[in-house]
Image: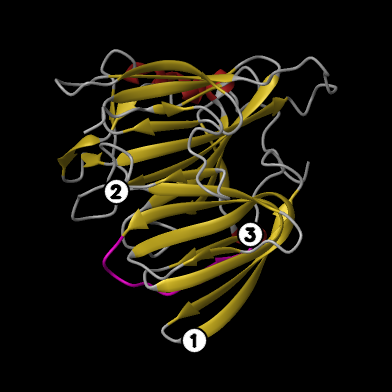
């Protein structure tokens, strides 16, 4: 068996017409998946019915149309797009297991996936209904689009969010882990990060710019995990276990990432354990203001 990899540059996970596919065919990966694709005129992406639940939404562009069949019923849902991933939330569609899918339209879209057993009702979430809030404070301020949290979405296995980190800020700090199931204390969840980066919306465009952020993670026990790397648009990081964070937006460049998490736990929850050397930082947030650049909406 091939040795697991935890970082993939843009293009390394391309498969056929898909820009990115992550699934259980990757060594050591089992509980989560994602797909990213770019639509052109007349192009249709198809996914056969299977035992996978999915969340679908536009990354950027005018929007997409999702035709799907669930319980022998044909349905159709248009998802309005956005200018960029830094323009605030967009429309989202949840589809449960045993659903065949066809996607058309324009722009780029992303799908979060998890193998599942139980069926839940499909759900359309318009952009105006996506929960948007800030987490952290000061230079740890970041924006969360919480459409795939258990408090917001009835689903079987996964937890899905979008995060926007303004230039110069940190996310995922303090470093934390969710790799050991302790009911009510810590979850055991795989995690995928899909990244995008851009010159900060507060700065003029720069021809020489090469937008970049940074990711850091390390082992929490005897299981091997060590990753500190630059991340750019289209890059993917996998977190099977271990401490992870911070995710850092370099000054001058805003950073976006999508997280999909799932695991073998009997319950669907996101409970984390902070690195004991770093957890104290949370207490300082009460003394600081939220970054005034947030929220990023309709930009």
Residue 257, placed above or below residue 231: below
Q: Is mark 2 on a helix, strand or loop?
A: loop
Label 1 close to label 3 by CB (< 8 Å)? no
Up the image or down, 251 lies above or below 190; here it is above
Q: On the image, which quarter does residue 152 sit in? A: bottom left
Q: How many labels does the image show?
A: 3
Instruction: Kindly check if marks 2 and 1 are in contact, taking CB atoms under 8 A apart as contact.
Output: no
Query: Nearer the observer, disc 1 or disc 3?
Result: 1
* Residue designated by label 3: 91
Q: At 67% from the left edge and 33% from the top edge, which residue is drawn?
A: 294
Label 2 environment density (alpha carbons within 10 Å; few <14, some 14–19, many ≥20): many
Say whether marks 3 and 2 touch (CB < 8 Å). Answer: no
Q: Which of marks 3 and 2 is in front?
A: 2
Instruction: Please provide percent x and percent y for residue 170.
Output: 53, 21
Q: What stretch is highlighted in magenta?
A: 116-126
* Residue 273 versus residue 265 in the image, above or below: above
Specify the farthest residue to the bottom: 72
Q: Residue 49 at what x, y percent from top left? A: 41, 71
In this rendered view, identify the residue nearer to me: 132 or 201.
201
Main SS of the magenta part reads loop
Is residue 288 visible in the rendered structure shown here? no
**Reading the chain from its start, which is encountered first: label 1 or label 3?**
1
- To which residue does mark 1 refer? 73
Using the image, tell me which numbered label, if any, was put on residue 268.
none
The verdict on residue 181 being magenta is: no
Would you call the spot at circle 3 few (<14 residues within 10 Å), some (14-19), or many (20 or more)? many
N-terminal-most mark, 3 or 2: 2
Q: What residue is disc 2 on?
A: 31
Q: Which of 106 and 177 is in front in this view?
A: 106
Distance from Cα at disc 1 to Cα at disc 3: 22 Å
């Amino acid at each position: 068996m091939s040795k697991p990899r935890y970082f993939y540059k843009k293009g390394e996970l391309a498969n056929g017409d898909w820009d990115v596919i992550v699934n259980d065919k990757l060594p050591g990966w089992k509980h989560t998946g994602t797909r990213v694709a770019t639509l052109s005129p007349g192009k249709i992406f198809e996914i056969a019915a299977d035992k996978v639940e999915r969340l679908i939404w536009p990354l950027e562009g005018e929007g997409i149309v999702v035709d799907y069949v669930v319980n022998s019923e044909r349905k159709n849902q248009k998802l309005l797009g956005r200018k960029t991933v830094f323009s605030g939330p967009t429309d989202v569609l949840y589809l449960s297991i045993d659903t065949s899918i066809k996607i058309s339209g324009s722009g780029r879209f992303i799908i979060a996936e998890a193998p599942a057993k139980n069926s839940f009702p499909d759900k359309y979430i318009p952009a105006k209904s996506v929960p948007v809030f800030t987490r952290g404070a000061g230079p740890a301020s970041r924006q969360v689009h919480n459409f795939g949290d258990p408090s917001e979405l009835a689903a079987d296995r996964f937890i899905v969010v979008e995060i926007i980190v303004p230039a110069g800020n940190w996310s995922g700090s303090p470093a934390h882990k969710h790799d050991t199931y302790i009911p009510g204390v810590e979850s055991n969840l795989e995690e995928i990060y899909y990244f995008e980066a851009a010159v900060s919306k507060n700065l003029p465009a720069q021809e020489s710019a090469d937008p970049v952020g940074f990711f850091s993670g390390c082992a929490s026990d005897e299981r091997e995990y060590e990753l500190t790397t630059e991340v750019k648009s289209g890059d993917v990081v996998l977190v099977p276990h271990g401490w992870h964070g911070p995710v850092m937006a370099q000054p001058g460049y805003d950073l976006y990432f999508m997280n999909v998490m799932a695991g073998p736990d009997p319950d669907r929850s996101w409970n984390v354990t902070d690195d004991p050397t770093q957890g104290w930082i949370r207490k300082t947030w009460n003394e600081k203001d939220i970054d005034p650049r947030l929220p990023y909406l309709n930009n």
